[in-house]
Image (tube, helix red, strand yellow):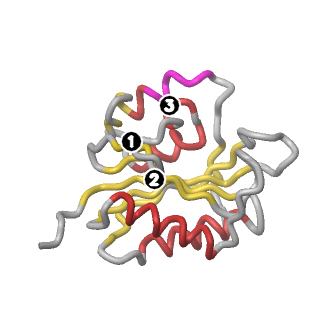
Amino acid sequence: MTPAARPAWVGLGSNLSDPVRQVLGATSELASLPETRLVRASGLFRSPPMGPRDQPDFINAVVLLQTCLEPLVLLDRLQLIEQAHGRQRARRWGERTLDLDLLVYGNERIDLPRLTVPHPGIPHRAFVLYPLVEVSPELEIPGYGSVAGLLAALPLEAVARRLEDPQ
């Protein structure tokens, strides 16, 4: 029996090797995952690095998928896409060609060695909340509350700028 499709929100980020191209390409690859359908993709947002400041700004986005893939299978697929884009984990919060984070998976709360969902950084990251509210303004994140409420609680200086025409 095939499991029912569930919504999954994935965060995308890049600050190396033509970041706009990296994020747009990964969005297409996410749409091509087996047993998965791309429902909606946010616009692209530019944000400063949250880690070391000696790196370029990031381009970020969020996509909403409907998927029959189980959470760890989806995580494995996300990591394969990262690897195909040349992802290397040189330093924590450092530069990268592509970063894919499983942010929310249906209404589930998952706490495993390899995966924590909802992603614990969501409430503090403008570069996640701005595109997330664009994709799903009514989203209630298990254990955290509404995405709109989380965005409203961010300090004013935590702003991610939307790119109007990434082409």
Is residue 134 visible in the rendered image? The answer is no
Q: Residue 72, percent across and down?
A: 38, 60
Q: Residue furthest right?
A: 54
- In the rendered structure, the answer to whether residue 90 lies left or right of residue 135 reads right
Q: Quadrant of the N terminus?
A: bottom left
Task: Single out the mark in the foreground, 1 or 3.
Answer: 1
Q: Which mark is residue 123?
A: 3
> Residue at left 16%, top 72%?
2
> Residue at left 46%, top 66%?
76
Say few, some or many: other residues with alpha carbon within 10 Å of mark 1 (under 14 / 14 to 19 / 20 or more): few
Task: Single out the mark in the foreground, 3 or 2.
Answer: 2
Circle 1 sits on which residue? 111
- In the rendered structure, the answer to whether residue 44 lies left or right of residue 132 reads right
Q: Looking at the image, do the residues carrying marks 1 and 3 touch, with CB atoms under 8 Å apart?
A: no
Is residue 71 visible in the rendered image? The answer is yes
**Start-end of magenta stretch:** 150-155
Amino acid type indicated by mark 2: Leu
Say few, some or many: other residues with alpha carbon within 10 Å of mark 2 (under 14 / 14 to 19 / 20 or more): many
- In the rendered structure, the answer to whether residue 67 lies left or right of residue 132 reads left
Considering the whole magenta stretch, tell me its main secondary structure.
helix
> Residue at left 65%, top 62%?
98
Which numbered disc flags the more N-terminal residue, 2 or 1? 2
Which numbered disc flags the more N-terminal residue, 3 or 2? 2
**CA separation in Å, label 1 and label 3:** 17 Å
Give the secondary structure at mark 2: strand
Amino acid type indicated by mark 1: Asp
The quadrant in which residue 40 appears is bottom left
Circle 2 sits on which residue? 102
Front residue of this view, candidates 163 and 41? 41
